[in-house]
Amino acid sequence: MFDTIKKYTPRSFKLFLSNLFGRCNEREYYNDIQEFAEGTTISSHIKIAEIFIKKLRPGYKVLDLGCGSGYMANRSAKLGCEVIGIDYSKKALKYAVKKNSGTAENKVKYIKRDIQLSLPFEDNFFDVVIIEEVLEHVRNSRKVLLEAYRVAKDGGRLLISVPYDSEPYGFHISPMNEKTIPVVFSGFNIKINRPFLPWCTTHIIEIEK
Protein backbone atom coordinates (compact mmCIF):
# COMPACT_ATOMS: atom_id res chain seq x y z
CA MET A 1 0.00 0.00 0.00
CA PHE A 2 2.83 2.39 0.86
CA ASP A 3 4.42 1.79 -2.55
CA THR A 4 1.08 2.67 -4.19
CA ILE A 5 0.88 5.93 -2.23
CA LYS A 6 4.44 6.83 -3.27
CA LYS A 7 3.72 6.00 -6.89
CA TYR A 8 0.72 8.30 -7.16
CA THR A 9 1.98 11.17 -5.03
CA PRO A 10 2.60 14.17 -7.34
CA ARG A 11 6.28 14.85 -8.00
CA SER A 12 5.92 18.53 -7.06
CA PHE A 13 4.50 17.60 -3.64
CA LYS A 14 7.37 15.18 -2.93
CA LEU A 15 9.86 17.90 -3.85
CA PHE A 16 8.03 20.38 -1.60
CA LEU A 17 8.17 18.03 1.39
CA SER A 18 11.83 17.20 0.79
CA ASN A 19 12.76 20.88 0.73
CA LEU A 20 10.53 21.82 3.68
CA PHE A 21 11.77 19.17 6.09
CA GLY A 22 15.32 19.19 4.75
CA ARG A 23 15.75 22.80 5.87
CA CYS A 24 15.43 21.63 9.48
CA ASN A 25 18.37 19.25 9.18
CA GLU A 26 21.99 19.17 8.13
CA ARG A 27 21.41 16.72 5.33
CA GLU A 28 25.04 16.34 4.34
CA TYR A 29 26.44 15.61 7.79
CA TYR A 30 26.61 12.52 9.93
CA ASN A 31 24.24 11.85 12.75
CA ASP A 32 26.57 10.56 15.50
CA ILE A 33 24.01 8.08 16.80
CA GLN A 34 22.70 6.65 13.53
CA GLU A 35 26.03 7.07 11.73
CA PHE A 36 24.69 8.28 8.41
CA ALA A 37 23.66 11.57 6.84
CA GLU A 38 20.81 13.41 8.53
CA GLY A 39 17.57 14.65 7.04
CA THR A 40 14.50 13.46 5.21
CA THR A 41 16.55 12.36 2.21
CA ILE A 42 18.65 9.92 4.26
CA SER A 43 17.31 6.81 2.59
CA SER A 44 17.58 8.36 -0.88
CA HIS A 45 21.26 9.20 -0.44
CA ILE A 46 22.03 5.76 0.89
CA LYS A 47 20.12 4.03 -1.91
CA ILE A 48 21.98 6.11 -4.50
CA ALA A 49 25.28 5.18 -2.83
CA GLU A 50 24.34 1.51 -2.99
CA ILE A 51 23.55 1.84 -6.71
CA PHE A 52 26.98 3.36 -7.28
CA ILE A 53 28.89 0.95 -5.05
CA LYS A 54 27.80 -1.97 -7.24
CA LYS A 55 29.76 -0.45 -10.10
CA LEU A 56 33.04 -0.28 -8.15
CA ARG A 57 35.77 -2.89 -7.79
CA PRO A 58 38.59 -3.30 -5.25
CA GLY A 59 41.67 -1.39 -6.34
CA TYR A 60 39.78 1.30 -8.27
CA LYS A 61 40.98 4.88 -7.87
CA VAL A 62 37.83 6.81 -6.96
CA LEU A 63 37.20 10.55 -6.72
CA ASP A 64 34.13 11.67 -4.75
CA LEU A 65 33.34 15.29 -5.68
CA GLY A 66 31.25 17.10 -3.09
CA CYS A 67 31.74 14.18 -0.73
CA GLY A 68 29.84 15.81 2.15
CA SER A 69 30.02 13.69 5.28
CA GLY A 70 31.97 10.97 3.49
CA TYR A 71 29.34 8.23 3.43
CA MET A 72 29.99 7.29 -0.20
CA ALA A 73 33.76 7.75 0.10
CA ASN A 74 34.03 5.56 3.19
CA ARG A 75 31.78 2.88 1.69
CA SER A 76 34.03 2.82 -1.39
CA ALA A 77 37.12 2.48 0.79
CA LYS A 78 35.60 -0.43 2.69
CA LEU A 79 35.21 -2.15 -0.66
CA GLY A 80 38.96 -1.77 -1.19
CA CYS A 81 39.08 1.31 -3.43
CA GLU A 82 41.66 4.08 -3.13
CA VAL A 83 39.50 7.13 -2.53
CA ILE A 84 39.88 10.91 -2.52
CA GLY A 85 36.95 12.97 -1.27
CA ILE A 86 36.66 16.70 -1.94
CA ASP A 87 34.27 19.15 -0.28
CA TYR A 88 34.23 22.86 0.55
CA SER A 89 32.57 22.44 3.96
CA LYS A 90 34.89 22.19 6.98
CA LYS A 91 32.05 20.75 9.03
CA ALA A 92 31.29 18.06 6.48
CA LEU A 93 34.94 17.05 6.26
CA LYS A 94 35.22 16.97 10.05
CA TYR A 95 32.51 14.32 10.15
CA ALA A 96 34.03 12.51 7.18
CA VAL A 97 37.44 12.27 8.85
CA LYS A 98 35.84 11.17 12.12
CA LYS A 99 34.22 8.22 10.34
CA ASN A 100 37.37 7.54 8.33
CA SER A 101 38.86 4.94 10.66
CA GLY A 102 39.96 1.35 10.24
CA THR A 103 42.46 -0.27 7.91
CA ALA A 104 40.47 -0.03 4.68
CA GLU A 105 38.99 3.39 5.35
CA ASN A 106 42.43 4.89 5.96
CA LYS A 107 42.82 4.83 2.18
CA VAL A 108 40.46 7.82 2.01
CA LYS A 109 42.13 11.20 1.62
CA TYR A 110 39.92 14.23 2.22
CA ILE A 111 40.65 17.62 0.65
CA LYS A 112 38.93 20.96 1.34
CA ARG A 113 38.42 22.67 -1.99
CA ASP A 114 35.81 24.37 -4.15
CA ILE A 115 35.03 21.77 -6.82
CA GLN A 116 34.16 24.58 -9.25
CA LEU A 117 37.89 25.32 -9.46
CA SER A 118 40.31 23.27 -11.54
CA LEU A 119 41.01 19.93 -9.89
CA PRO A 120 44.59 19.27 -8.68
CA PHE A 121 44.95 16.00 -10.60
CA GLU A 122 46.47 15.06 -13.93
CA ASP A 123 44.43 13.85 -16.87
CA ASN A 124 43.20 10.24 -16.97
CA PHE A 125 43.84 9.58 -13.27
CA PHE A 126 40.69 8.03 -11.74
CA ASP A 127 38.82 4.87 -12.65
CA VAL A 128 35.58 6.36 -11.35
CA VAL A 129 34.47 9.90 -10.52
CA ILE A 130 31.35 10.20 -8.35
CA ILE A 131 29.17 13.31 -8.23
CA GLU A 132 26.24 12.43 -5.98
CA GLU A 133 23.53 15.07 -5.49
CA VAL A 134 25.99 17.92 -6.06
CA LEU A 135 25.57 19.59 -9.48
CA GLU A 136 22.30 21.23 -8.44
CA HIS A 137 24.19 23.03 -5.62
CA VAL A 138 26.84 24.74 -7.79
CA ARG A 139 26.49 27.59 -10.26
CA ASN A 140 28.99 26.27 -12.78
CA SER A 141 27.83 22.67 -13.06
CA ARG A 142 29.17 22.39 -16.61
CA LYS A 143 32.72 23.22 -15.49
CA VAL A 144 32.51 20.68 -12.65
CA LEU A 145 31.41 18.06 -15.16
CA LEU A 146 34.19 18.88 -17.64
CA GLU A 147 36.87 18.69 -14.93
CA ALA A 148 35.46 15.40 -13.68
CA TYR A 149 35.63 14.02 -17.21
CA ARG A 150 39.19 15.27 -17.66
CA VAL A 151 40.55 13.45 -14.62
CA ALA A 152 38.70 10.21 -15.40
CA LYS A 153 40.73 7.52 -17.15
CA ASP A 154 40.08 6.50 -20.71
CA GLY A 155 37.74 3.57 -20.23
CA GLY A 156 36.68 4.93 -16.84
CA ARG A 157 33.30 6.34 -15.92
CA LEU A 158 31.46 9.15 -14.20
CA LEU A 159 28.62 8.22 -11.83
CA ILE A 160 26.29 11.16 -11.24
CA SER A 161 22.97 11.70 -9.52
CA VAL A 162 20.79 14.81 -9.57
CA PRO A 163 17.27 15.38 -8.24
CA TYR A 164 14.52 16.51 -10.57
CA ASP A 165 14.06 20.28 -10.11
CA SER A 166 11.69 22.27 -12.27
CA GLU A 167 13.25 25.54 -11.05
CA PRO A 168 15.77 26.78 -8.45
CA TYR A 169 14.63 26.41 -4.83
CA GLY A 170 16.22 26.23 -1.40
CA PHE A 171 19.86 25.21 -1.74
CA HIS A 172 19.36 24.03 -5.32
CA ILE A 173 20.59 26.87 -7.52
CA SER A 174 21.10 24.98 -10.78
CA PRO A 175 17.90 23.05 -11.52
CA MET A 176 18.29 19.70 -13.26
CA ASN A 177 15.41 18.61 -15.47
CA GLU A 178 14.54 17.58 -19.02
CA LYS A 179 15.42 21.06 -20.32
CA THR A 180 18.68 21.72 -18.47
CA ILE A 181 20.27 18.26 -18.45
CA PRO A 182 20.74 18.20 -22.26
CA VAL A 183 22.54 21.57 -21.99
CA VAL A 184 24.80 20.68 -19.05
CA PHE A 185 25.64 17.27 -20.52
CA SER A 186 25.91 18.42 -24.13
CA GLY A 187 28.54 16.45 -26.06
CA PHE A 188 28.53 13.49 -23.67
CA ASN A 189 27.05 10.10 -24.39
CA ILE A 190 24.94 9.73 -21.26
CA LYS A 191 22.91 6.85 -19.90
CA ILE A 192 20.05 7.94 -17.64
CA ASN A 193 18.07 5.90 -15.16
CA ARG A 194 15.24 7.38 -13.09
CA PRO A 195 14.66 5.19 -10.03
CA PHE A 196 11.96 6.27 -7.62
CA LEU A 197 13.51 7.08 -4.25
CA PRO A 198 11.82 8.42 -1.09
CA TRP A 199 10.68 12.03 -1.39
CA CYS A 200 12.21 12.73 -4.77
CA THR A 201 12.65 11.61 -8.34
CA THR A 202 16.33 11.21 -9.07
CA HIS A 203 18.24 11.05 -12.33
CA ILE A 204 21.10 8.53 -12.21
CA ILE A 205 23.46 9.54 -15.01
CA GLU A 206 26.38 7.45 -16.18
CA ILE A 207 29.10 8.53 -18.60
CA GLU A 208 31.71 6.15 -19.97
CA LYS A 209 34.89 7.78 -21.18
Image (cartoon, helix red, strand yellow):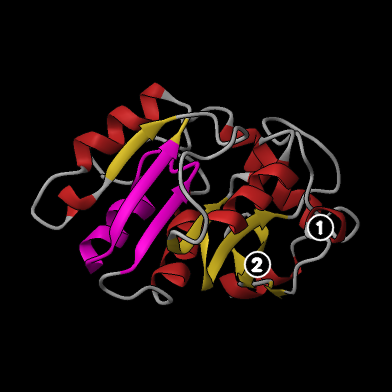
Q: Is residue 38 visible?
A: no
Residue 112, percent from left and from top = 41, 28
Taking the image as shown, residue 33 lies to the left or right of residue 199, namely left
Task: Specify the amino acid type for callout 1.
Answer: Ile
Taking the image as shown, residue 2 lies to the left or right of residue 55, namely right
Picture quarter with the N terminus: bottom right
Picture quarter with the C terminus: bottom right
Q: Is residue 6 visible?
A: yes
Residue 156, percent from left and from top = 51, 72
Residue 51, percent from left and from top = 47, 71
Q: Which mark is residue 181?
A: 1
Residue at 66 percent across and 68 percent down: it is 5
Label 2 close to label 1 by CB (< 8 Å): yes
Q: Which residue lies furthest to the left in this view?
A: 103
| Residue 194 lies within the magenta run | no
Q: Tell me which corner region of the image, top left, top right, bottom left or bottom right, holds residue 127.
A: bottom left
Residue at 71 percent across and 36 percent down: it is 172
| Residue 69 lies within the magenta run | yes
Taking the image as shown, residue 49 lies to the left or right of residue 96, namely right
Residue 205, percent from left and from top = 65, 67
Within 10 angstroms of label 1, few (less than 14), some, or many (20 or more) residues?
some
In this orientation, which residue lies closer to the viewer: 164 or 135?
135
Q: Residue furthest front?
A: 122
Q: Which mark is residue 205?
A: 2
In this orientation, which residue lies closer to the viewer: 46 or 79?
79
Asked if residue 121 is positioned above or below residue 194 in the image, the reply reads above
In this orientation, which residue lies closer to the viewer: 29 or 114?
114
Q: How far apart are marks 2 and 1 (CA)?
A: 10 Å
Q: What element carries label 1?
A: helix
**Residues in magenta?**
60-86
Dot 2 or dot 1, earlier in sequence = 1
